[in-house]
């Protein structure tokens, strides 16, 4: 990147100025920088909640760039064709972007890089979405890690460079190309009335992400290890929403955790472990991309999961009406806030895949449509880990009992009361807002009778164990 022609900064899941290697490299060249976001087929395929949340992030980031004298160009169409059109319009001689690791993005980016190279345009991807490039973490035998704990031990002592500051100036082109209007994309169309409910809980943009991290490090990280599993305690960072869309970098979070460790805050190391759990998911997806669509472990294709999405018990699970309060509270939290506590995700996923004997792909797709913090790697690994077909080192068939889990992690029933209105004399506002968020076609009301369990905890456990033992035999 040595001439004076503009550089196209292809904005993707990196909606931030601070610690953004792609932006820093573009600005460091001294050439005009044209930020562009492309609504291609990958964006079009996003589920309702993540697409809506991405739209909010783009709108906020456009304002952030505008305050710096820059602009965010919005274009719709296939990535390669769109970039070529912009190159023709602007005379850009290079395109730079933050590297992605999911198989669909990898295939797209390789094709773009090869085609632009043939056009004589420099195309360059840089790190920024993970702490360590997947090909840089190997076992002693040169293979990738398939179990988390050895992976953590391999990276915990590695040097992670300090986050880079935001560039002081983003060089502008002499002329800006035409841009779409974000409103015309209707990113939130599929959310319908649920958008107004979830909007009360989102925290959009780089500034909000930095504030979240600062507040967490100051007041919550010390107790993180001991309290993170209690969904009513509000002891987690809630940064998954911002990390997903790159409104904050993992490197920034990592160094905040290290600083908290230096201050003697007990939960800081566990926070770093959770960042590495996210890292582990992306490394697994890079090395075994089939994890998003097929059983990761061999020998699970014959497991007798149901694939009937219309089964009454599956419909009950989707609607938070299983009759198992912990499971239903988890699902309702997702409809109201767009997120779900990690412990609750495990319980809801285990109930679907074990107690209801339903294929994990049905749950994965449902979460992909309803989570504003949807992360393709974490979602895939999490569902397969719970289902038993994924990267779990446990030598047994793990089944979470949703009743005993509630007794252990929600002993006072606070979490369940927060999200379930039926049968309560004075339901909470959050519990009532569930009925405002879900489709009217579900015909649900807080005055409804709370359902009996579609499958009890014990009956579901026995059925799942029988299926597993038959598979083993």
Image: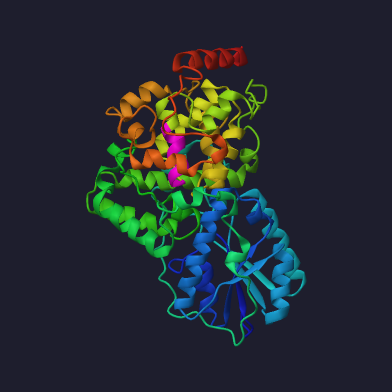
Foreground residue among 70 and 124:
70
Q: Is residue 317 above or below residue 142?
A: above
Say how the picture is coloured: rainbow
Left or right of residue 227: residue 158: right
Q: Based on the displayed image, in which of its 4 quarters is residue 215 positioned?
A: bottom left
The foreground one among 169 and 42 is 42
Q: Total of numbered circles in the picture? A: 0
Look at the image and give the residue range highlighted in magenta: 329-338
Please, what is the dominant secondary structure of the magenta stretch? helix
Residue drawn at point x = 44 percent, y = 28 percent: 448
Q: Residue furthest bottom?
A: 174
Does residue 80 appear left or right of residue 145 in this picture?
right
**Between 21 and 77, the one nearer to me in the picture:** 77
Residue 451 drawn at (x, y percent): 46, 22
Magenta run includes residue 88: no
Q: Quadrant of the C terminus?
A: top right
What residue sits 48% from the left and 76% below the top?
66
Residue 83 in the image: x percent, y percent?
Answer: 69, 70
Q: Give the answer, above or below, for where 345 lies relative to 222.
A: above
Location of the N terminus (image quadrant): bottom right
Does 280 sit above or below residue 421?
below
């Amino acid at each position: 990147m040595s001439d004076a022609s503009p550089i196209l900064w292809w904005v993707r899941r990196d909606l931030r100025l601070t610690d953004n290697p792609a932006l820093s490299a573009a600005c460091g060249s001294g050439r005009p920088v044209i930020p562009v976001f492309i609504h291609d087929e990958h964006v079009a395929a996003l589920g309702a909640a993540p697409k809506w949340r991405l739209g909010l992030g783009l709108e906020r980031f456009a304002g952030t760039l505008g305050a710096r004298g820059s602009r965010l160009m919005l274009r719709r169409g296939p990535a390669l064709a769109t970039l070529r059109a912009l190159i023709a319009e602007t005379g850009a001689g290079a395109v730079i972007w933050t590297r992605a690791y999911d198989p669909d993005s990898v295939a797209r980016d390789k094709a773009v890089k090869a085609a632009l190279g043939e056009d004589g345009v420099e195309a360059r991807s840089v790190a920024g979405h993970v702490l360590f490039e997947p090909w840089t973490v190997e076992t002693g035998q040169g293979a990738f890690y398939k179990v988390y704990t050895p992976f953590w031990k391999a990276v915990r002592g590695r040097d992670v460079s300090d986050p880079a500051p935001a560039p002081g100036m983003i060089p502008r082109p002499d002329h800006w190309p035409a841009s779409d209007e974000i409103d015309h994309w209707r990113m939130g169309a599929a959310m319908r009335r649920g958008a107004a409910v979830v909007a009360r809980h989102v925290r959009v943009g780089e500034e909000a992400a930095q504030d979240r991290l600062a507040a967490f490090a100051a007041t919550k990280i010390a107790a993180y290890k001991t309290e993170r599993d209690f969904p009513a305690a509000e002891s987690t960072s809630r940064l998954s929403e911002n990390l997903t869309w790159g409104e904050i970098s993992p490197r920034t979070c990592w160094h905040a955790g290290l600083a908290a460790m230096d201050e003697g805050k007990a939960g800081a190391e566990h926070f770093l472990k959770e960042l590495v759990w996210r890292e582990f998911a992306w490394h697994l997806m890079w090395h075994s991309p089939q994890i998003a669509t097929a059983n990761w472990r061999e020998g699970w294709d014959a497991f007798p999961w149901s694939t009937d999405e219309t089964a009454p018990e599956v419909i009950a699970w989707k609607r938070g009406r299983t009759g198992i309060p912990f499971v239903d509270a988890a699902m309702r939290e997702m409809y109201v806030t767009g997120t779900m506590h990690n412990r609750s995700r495990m319980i809801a996923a285990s109930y679907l895949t074990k107690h209801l004997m339903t294929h994990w792909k049905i749950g994965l797709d449902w979460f992909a449509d309803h989570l504003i913090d949807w992360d393709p790697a974490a979602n895939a690994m999490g569902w397969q880990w719970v289902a038993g077909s994924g990267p779990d080192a446990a030598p047994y068939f793990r089944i979470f009992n949703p009743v005993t889990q509630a007794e252990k992690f929600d002993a006072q029933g606070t979490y369940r009361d927060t999200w379930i209105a039926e049968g309560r004399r004075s339901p909470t506002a959050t519990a009532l807002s569930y009925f405002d968020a879900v489709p009217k076609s579900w015909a649900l009301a807080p005055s409804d009778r709370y359902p009996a369990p579609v499958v009890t905890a014990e009956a579901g456990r026995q059925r799942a164990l029988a299926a597993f033992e038959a598979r083993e035999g």
